[in-house]
Amino acid sequence: MTSEEEMIIQTPDYEDNSYEEEEKEKSEKSDKEIIRFQNLSYTYSSKTTALKGISLSINQGEFVFIVGESGSGKSTLIRTLLGELKPTEGDIIVEGANLKNIGRKEMPYYRRRLGVVFQEFKLLEDRNVYENVEIAQRVIGVKKDKRIENCNEMIKLVGLSDQSKKKVRELSGGEQQRVAIARAMVNKPSILLADEPTGNLDPNNSWEIMGLLQNLNEMGTTVVVVTHNDNLVNSMQKRVITLQTGEIIGDKLGGYIQ
Amino acid sequence: MSNFFYGIGQGIKGMFQNKMFSFAAIGTVTACLFIFGVFFSVILNFRAIVYKAESQVGITVFFEENLAQADIEHIGVLIKQMKGVDSVKYVSPEEAWENFKKDKFENDEDLIETFGDENPLKDSASYVVKISDMKQEPTISKDIEALEGVRKVNSIEAVAGSINNFNLLVAYVSITLIVLLILVSVFLISSTVAMGISVRKEEIAIMKLIGATDRFVRFPFIVEGVLIGIIGAAIPVGLLYIFYGSASDYIAKQFPSISKWFDMVDSVSVFSVVIPASALLGIGIGLLGSAHSVRRHLKV
């Protein structure tokens, strides 16, 4: 493993912290900016402007909902953060690094800092639960023994230990999304991006997934969730950023704007 | 190292998972390399015929009447010293008459008897000069003609020209065909692998989004392409080996008259080139085809 890779996957071993240390760390973290969008605009080649001058900042350890109607620019914002789309204007700064300065070759190493969960799960259908989680560890070159330990730990955390040998296509939607979360989190990224993670799930499964994301946030991960599920947003009382036609029209703590 | 073996494993798995595409790609490489092998064998045998023809034709040098044997021998020495001359053979008037009788009269005793003991070719002693490179034939003929004591030189300019032209034609046609076949193979395997990859573009996109490097994503597809190339090369080589051996036996048995003046090039000579060339082409085609196809899907 290169020193660059080591640096990227290094995250605090949050499980060993005492309660007091965790609380202290949490309050310190909450003041530290982890993501900043600076006057960000994005226009598709079809001349449709999806984002217009977005400026916002997300601190380490925050749980943020990004809401808005279809076409408001929520997913475009996530895709620019993932480096899938290059901003037409403005900057995205993640953990102090400006995405503008990250070249094609460095992009995979940048992406390893982020865990990503999608509405349609995006799992490798022909592989089992374990293999789907393991691929994220293989990508960063983790050794076999450590890989087995980390994957089993994460599969246990999402409650799928007894199903780890099952092909993912045999699982329910909620279970598949748990696998996706385990894969996103196994490398212990500092940021978890979830694009409509409950979009394909029934209310019960949606609540379970949100509970899981909340747990991960409590363990120290910064969680950014794109959704249009009003009930979840209103019940969870987190920071909510509302987008409309590519612009921020609301940014407040504790509930959804109606 | 762990990811290296993982990539190989995934490449093998991918080949079996996409059976239809793998089968089509192997078929494409097999067809192209089989045609390549057939052309190569044919070309090699053509060249063998040309070499044989070259070695059998020679310039005939006749001497002035009543030239002393010592002068004839001196002319022989001078010819041997000329650049491009392979061998010089003296044909006495007696040998010339014997050859004539055999060729023209087909040993017809009645006809031969009309000549009695007289040798009508008594002034037809000659040298048959073999040359190593047909292109030098006109110069050598001219130089021999200029020697003192030489009456006539039967030049083989027309034959030499034809052999040269035929040699050139065979070379051009074979190079063109082989280049065309390689291009067609690369295009076909690239399209076939691209079809297989487009089915798995979602998988590639997922890998990229979880932070896989291009090398990590590309490697299993390269392994798959190379495997397809190796299998696609092994099949036509095997088929050709059987086919070539049978063709040699068939020609020898069924066409003994052809076999008299033309021996098919032996299998070892043909396959010592066909096997490594096919393996290299197969691997190269597989490598190029898969690398080209996967590149389009890496821009995530």
Image (cartoon, coloured by chain):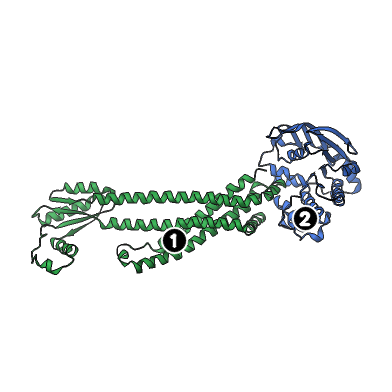
Quarter residue A88 falls in:
top right
Vertical comparison of B259 with A120: above or below? below
The number of numbered badges drawn on the structure is: 2
**Does residue B164 appear in this view?**
yes
Chain B, which colour? Answer: green
The chain that appears blue in the image is: A
Residue type (three-letter) at the residue carrying disc 1: Phe
Residue B257 in the image: state x and y as whole percent: 30, 65
Distance between the alpha carbons at the discs numbered 2 and 1: 51 Å
**Residue plotted at (10% across, 57% down):** B123
> Mark 2 or mark 1, which is nearer to you?
1
Quarter residue A236 falls in:
top right
Quarter residue A134 falls in:
bottom right
Position of A106 compared to A27: left or right?
left
Query: Nearest the camera: B239 or A46?
Result: A46
**Residue plotted at (75% across, 47% down):** A9
Which of the labelled discs sits on residue B271, or is there none? 1
Position of B184 compared to B200: left or right?
left
Residue A165 in the image: state x and y as whole percent: 76, 61
**Does residue A7 appear in this view?**
no
Q: Which residue is mark 2?
A: A151
**Residue plotted at (11% across, 52% down):** B64
Vertical comparison of B61 with B116: above or below? above
**Chain at numbered mark 1:** B
Residue A81 in the image: state x and y as whole percent: 75, 39
Q: Secondary structure at mark 1?
A: helix
Q: Secondary structure at mark 2?
A: helix
Which of the labelled discs sits on residue A172, or is there none? none
Query: Nearest the camera: B273 or B192?
Result: B192
Residue type (three-letter) at the residue carrying disc 2: Cys
